[in-house]
Amino acid sequence: MKHFTIASLFIVFAAIGIVFNCGRSIASGIREGGRTYDIGICTDKGMVNPVNEDTCGMFAVGRDVVCAVCDGVGGAAAGSTASRTAFMALKEYFEDNGLGSGIVGMHESLAAAFAFADRKVRTVAASDSLLNGMATTCLVSVIRNDTLYYCHAGDCRLYVGGPSGLKQMTEDDSYINMLLADGEITEREARRHPLRMAIINAVGSKSNELYVNFCTKGIPVRDDIYCLMCSDGLYEELSERRICRVVKRNIDKDGDSIARELVRSANRAGGWDNISAIVIRGVN
């Protein structure tokens, strides 16, 4: 359970491939502007929680492809409502306003979309006392011209993997990261800290003013590397080394198969939280 802590080969034009809490969604062979991408999506409630509070999926905005992972905060109905509301708000904003031109324009559009989602989640939470305090983390990637751009709020992660291993591209907005940055705890202590899953930034939270972390440059989308977007239910169960092993064993399969195997491995390792994974690769 996540906690929130105050710390001061198909052509897709406008199709949506949302995954809520219904297992998996196949999205292999996505073609954008004549370029083909292999995108696999899988989500699962895990082995312990009765409800999947994650929402993840993809949709097209013009010639761009947008992928998102949202991990709800608030428990059961509240968490799933928060993540679903944020996902749909992002889609609504991008479909109405586009994604801007150039990296500066894209950043402005992403910031505005996150702000729109933040207001939507707050409004829905205020309408029902059972949803009071709900919020959601959010990681968004945009594929444009064979390049992936990303931004996030919270602790969903983006990794880039290849022959040399796995590299984490995002930095968690978490209480533990704040303690590590201040030198108050060690990496070893962080792995066992009782508040290791507490976050300090989320969409719709009443406890903080939302801030969005943007990439400074894009990541090339190629067939010899892969991008992995995931909720904490995956990386809390699987180390980077184990993630690499799972991908390597399934590297000749499509992205959907790789995403499913990652989620299955996380469930076999314990599955203490909801688990979501989106695998993105280029196709020759």
Image (tube, grey):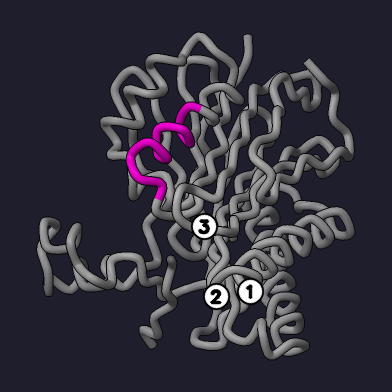
Q: Quadrant of residue 182?
A: bottom left
Cα separation between marks 1 and 3: 27 Å
Whether residue 102 can be seen here: no
What's the magenta region? 261-271
- SS under mark 1: helix
Q: Quadrant of residue 44?
A: top right
Tell me if mark 2 has few (under 14), some (14-19) or many (20+) residues whose alpha carbon lies within 10 angstroms of its own: many
Q: Nearer the viewer, residue 205 or 270?
A: 270
Badge 2 amino acid: Gly
Percent across and percent down for residue 220 are 53, 29
Percent across and percent down for residue 116 are 74, 72
Badge 1 amino acid: Ala
Residue 266 painted magenta:
yes
Cα separation between marks 1 and 2: 5 Å
Tell me if mark 3 has few (under 14), some (14-19) or many (20+) residues whose alpha carbon lies within 10 angstroms of its own: some
Compared to 265, does 19 lie above or below? below
Percent across and percent down for residue 170 are 41, 51
Do the residues under discs 1 and 2 have CB atoms within 8 angstroms? yes
- Which residue position holds label 3? 214
- SS under mark 2: loop
Q: Nearer the viewer, residue 85 or 147?
A: 85
- Mark found first going from the N terminus, 1 or 3: 1
- Which residue position holds label 1? 78
Badge 3 amino acid: Phe
Compared to 84, does 101 lie above or below? above
Residue 180 painted magenta:
no
State which quarter of the image contains the C terminus: top right
Instruction: Please indicate whether residue 240 sits to the left or right of residue 105 in the image.
Output: left
Instruction: Please indicate whether residue 25 sits to the left or right of residue 48 in the image.
Output: right
Please tell me whether the stretch drawn in magenta is mainly helix, strand or loop.
Answer: helix
Q: Quadrant of residue 93?
A: bottom right
- SS under mark 3: strand
